Image (spheres, rainbow, N blue to C red):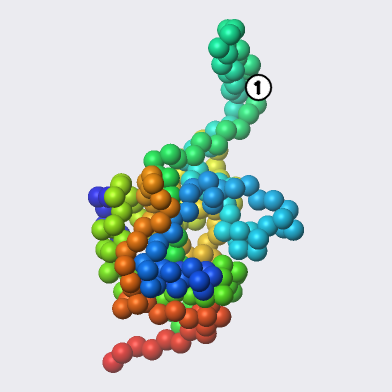
């Protein structure tokens, strides 16, 4: 990863208490496969509440095409068959990275009206506050045995432009309230990376406390 990024002053992981205890005490950082985030939305009644807020059917979108095209059927026994389609839409997804780890990032510049959106509480009843994000990221990077990338997520209009190019650090604007900072990596053998106990750089709270922020400038 050859680029400079601005590390947030605070990173927050919201989730189930038992998972965050594993993160804090064992250093178990669970990376979700891209497909897990991209699963098509179902009817609300079929969805776990957390999944409904996490899923983005365009997660990892790289290009979107629209126009005339064709579909080719490959056959082992006969000639390949190609069918022309006068109008079709095609989404192409990135395959450079296989897994994602996502956190909420407190912005580097805020005003005293800044609030964490209450929808974030849908991710779980607990929140792990990473008090030293740079230290956390350095420990994590040191344990990732593959290529990786990380950055703040930017958000585009909910109807992505046709024939446009997108990056893995872009998401639909409907998810902007997540204020996401993400790490993308290729994990082959396991979905988890273990970085050791991080109780020295983290605090475990109930997620409801995120809605009551107070600001103070040190003189």
Left or right, 110 with respect to 174, comes to left
Quick check: 67 left or right of 219? right
Q: Where is 154 relative to 88, above or below?
A: below
Tell me the residue at 29%/50% (across/down).
Answer: 145
Give the farthest residue toward the bottom.
Answer: 219
Quadrant holding the C terminus: bottom left
* Residue denoted by label 1: 86
Give the image quarter of residue 128.
bottom left
Rendering coords of residue 13 (x, y %): 45, 69
Crowdedness of circle 1 by 10 Å Cα count: few (<14), some, many (20+)? Answer: few
Q: Left or right? Give the position of 13 relative to 67.
A: left
**Residue depicted at x 38% and y 44%:** 188
Residue placed most toward the observer, 87 or 15: 15
**Is any atom of residue 131 visible in this view?**
no
Q: Residue furthest top?
A: 78
Give the residue drawn at x 31%, y 78%: 200
Q: Tag 1's secondary structure?
A: strand
Q: Position of residue 4 (x, y in %)?
A: 26, 57
In this rendered view, identify the residue nearer to me: 153 or 41.
41
**Measured along the vertical axis of the image, is residue 116 above or below residue 4?**
below
Residue 94 location, quadrant: top left
* Residue 60 visible here: yes
Q: Quadrant of residue 120?
A: bottom right
Above or below 194: residue 167 = above
| Residue visible at 44% across and 59% down in the picture | 30
Q: Percent x, y for residue 176?
A: 53, 62
Q: Depth check: give the residue in front, 183 or 162.
A: 183
Q: Position of residue 67 (x, y in %)?
A: 59, 27
């Amino acid at each position: 990863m050859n680029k400079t990024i601005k590390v947030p002053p605070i990173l927050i992981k919201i989730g189930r208490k038992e998972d965050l205890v594993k993160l804090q005490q064992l250093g178990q950082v669970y990376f979700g496969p891209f497909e897990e985030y991209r699963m098509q939305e179902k009817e609300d009644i079929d969805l776990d509440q957390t999944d409904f807020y996490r899923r983005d059917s365009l997660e990892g979108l790289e290009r979107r095409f629209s126009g005339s095209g064709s579909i080719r059927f490959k056959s082992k026994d006969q000639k390949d068959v190609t069918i022309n389609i006068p109008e079709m839409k095609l989404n192409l997804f990135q395959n450079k990275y296989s897994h994602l780890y996502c956190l909420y990032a407190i912005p580097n510049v805020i005003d005293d009206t800044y609030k964490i959106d209450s929808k974030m509480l849908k991710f779980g009843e607990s929140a792990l506050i990473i008090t030293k994000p740079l230290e956390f990221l350095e420990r994590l990077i040191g344990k990732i045995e593959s290529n990786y990338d990380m950055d703040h997520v930017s958000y585009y209009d909910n109807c992505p432009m046709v024939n446009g190019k997108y990056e893995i650090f872009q998401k639909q604007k409907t998810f902007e309230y997540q204020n996401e900072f993400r790490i993308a990596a290729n994990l082959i053998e396991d979905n988890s990376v273990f970085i050791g106990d991080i109780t020295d750089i983290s605090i475990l709270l109930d997620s409801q406390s995120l809605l009551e922020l107070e600001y103070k400038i040190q003189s």
